[in-house]
Amino acid sequence: MRDAKKISEQPSFDVWKVRRDFPALNQTVHEKKLVYLDNAATSQKPQTVIDAVSHFYSQDCSNIHRGVHTLSERATKSYEEAREKVRQFIGARSTKEIIFVRGATEAINLVAQTYGRTCLKEGDEIIISAMEHHSNIVPWQILCEQRKTRLRVIPMNDRGELLLEELARLLGPRTKLLSVVHVSNALGTINPVKKIISMAHQFGVPVLIDGAQAVPHLTVNVQDLDCDFYTFSSHKVYGPTGVGVLYGKEALLEKMPPYQGGGDMISSVTFEKTLYNTLPYRFEAGTPNIAGGIGLGRAIDYLNHEVGIEVASHYEKELLDYATEQISKIPGVRIIGTASEKMGVLSFVFDDIHPHDVGTLLDEEGIAIRTGHHCAQPVMERFKVPATCRASFSFYNTKEEVDALVRGLHKVREVFK
Amino acid sequence: MSEARELYQEIILDHNKKPRNFFKLEKADLTAEGYNPICGDRISVYLQMDGDHISNITFQGSGCAISKASASLMTSSIKGKSKEEAEDLVGKFRKLIMGEAPGDDLGKLTVFEGVSEFPARVKCASLAWHTLQAALEKKRETVSTE
């Protein structure tokens, strides 16, 4: 308890204050106080984001980019302001480089089906890593079938760290694209993406970084990283579901053909010829998730002004270290993913209790964790486990909640003794 | 842990720890494989037939306590039954875990009644039974719960 105080008494970060901003945290599950430790799946939303979405539907509801009436102008302004907030949030050069999509998954599919389909040909190679989410595997496998290209995989060690010397061996004249995760959703590993990008660039290979688990925890600057594409989902960074971001360097986006055809992505249409719209609208066919985009903008404001991503990040790291230390002490528990650089995620298994049994028993205690393969089956195979238990943390989680998880896990042990 | 504790009754924990008929039948007449892609559980069911009767039934595989205990108790209750009786039991067990019918005549299998309170776990309990059904129907490809 003394240690818990030490964390919460840090002048820069008051966890009990930010917790009040998240209405969903304040509830009971099975008559127990909710302990929400499934943040890598989706984060809870602060009231201000919920209000922004509600405000759009109750006051500004209209379509964007075409109406001349007041509501449409208000909605367009809010939506485009959100795009500017995203630009600043990830340090992009221009809002032309910020494309709103449905989520990180769609962003990767977009790159595979536009850049990939036009720039890759038979015999070319795409490099991914052994710790990818299915969303950074399957779009490339689809492309490989279409273009007869080959998928290569950077292996990892037993701690869950990528082997960069193996990447050096994989890179070559056939390599045409590298797509790698920034922070692993199954292991928590923070990959040295800046180094990986610079290795790829020596071979003129463009790099996509899947930042879905990084953006909620780390300050990201795409110009500093010098990545060619960066993707993330709004709902994991305290914004609404159904909206996400594809960042792409303008020069690359300019070369890419459209993804989907329809309204908003054109400048003029006749039956003979259609002229496509300019960036970023060329990749945004149809009416987008307007409320979602506005909500994401508000979530970014909240992170910047109410929380402070740097102090939150520091606090989250302390929390993860504390949880790792406590859970390692439970008899029969093995941590999966022990990289030296980790963030947000703690995956573990009991030697004789299946994760699903753990998950069901913890839920009874009001504790929400994820159990399963976390859409990363190759990672499970690499560590020879069918599934793991995954506790994932946000800045609104407390040391007391980690203690509740540890107590819950001891109870699970009791049931299966 | 009231409801969940009820789910994990002694008999389920016992069959999880010491699964019965948990080996491969080398001379099986019918076999099938089952897979639950959501949790990665895999199971193989092996049957020896004597005409229309199941003279022996065993299983192998990995999974959670619910799926393992369900497979173990299934083999115990199926051995010696006719194909028709076995199929009838598959149907009754499915209704039990879906909460559609009480399992008054299902003996030990009634311990799985509580599964219906946990929709996410129904597939764990049904995997072995799906696989048995597939073996009886002589299906060759792996059956999936999805």
Image (cartoon, grey):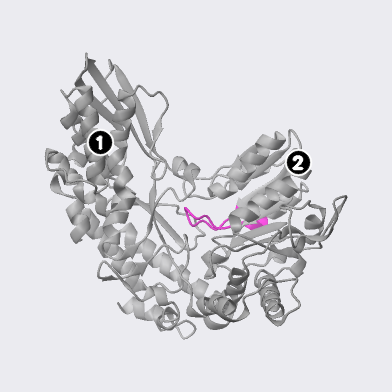
Residue A120 circle label:
2
Q: Residue at x 74, y 64 (%)?
A: A97
SS assignment for the magenta stretch, majority:
loop
Q: Which residue is drawn at 22% across and 59% down?
A: A411
Looking at this view, name the residue that lies furthest to the right.
Answer: A272
Residue at x 22%, y 17% (from the top left corner): B52
Have a look at marks 2 and 1 and say if they share a chain.
no
**Residue A347 or B82: which is nearer the viewer?**
B82
The magenta region covers A181-195
Residue B63 position within the rendered picture, expressed as x and y whole percent measured from the top left:
31, 40
Mark 1, Cα crowd under 10 Å, few <14 / some 14-19 / many 20+, is: few
Is residue A297 placed above or below A358 in the rendered structure?
A: below
The residues tagged by marks 2 and 1 sit, at their Cα atoms, a distance apart of: 52 Å
Q: In this view of the protein, which residue sits in the foreground, B60 or A205?
A: B60
Q: Which residue is at 66% across, 59% downward?
A: A230
| Residue at far front of view | A271
Report the disc number at residue B91: 1
Q: Quadrant of residue A225?
A: bottom right
Residue A274 percent location from the top left of the image = 84, 54
Q: Where is residue A9 in the image (x, y as percent from the top left)?
A: 40, 84
Quadrant in which residue A80 is drawn: bottom right
What secondary structure is found at the residue carrying circle 2?
Answer: loop
Q: Label 1's element?
A: helix
Q: Quadrant of residue A365?
A: bottom left
Q: Does the magenta stretch include residue A202?
A: no
Q: As drawn, is A218 to the left or to the right of B22?
A: right
Residue A74 image point, x, y percent? 68, 80
| Chain name for mark 2 | A
- Give the chain of mark 1: B
Is B64 positioned to the left or the right of A123 in the image?
A: left
Label 2 Cα crowd, 10 Å radius (few <14 / some 14-19 / many 20+) = many
Amino acid beneath label 2: Leu
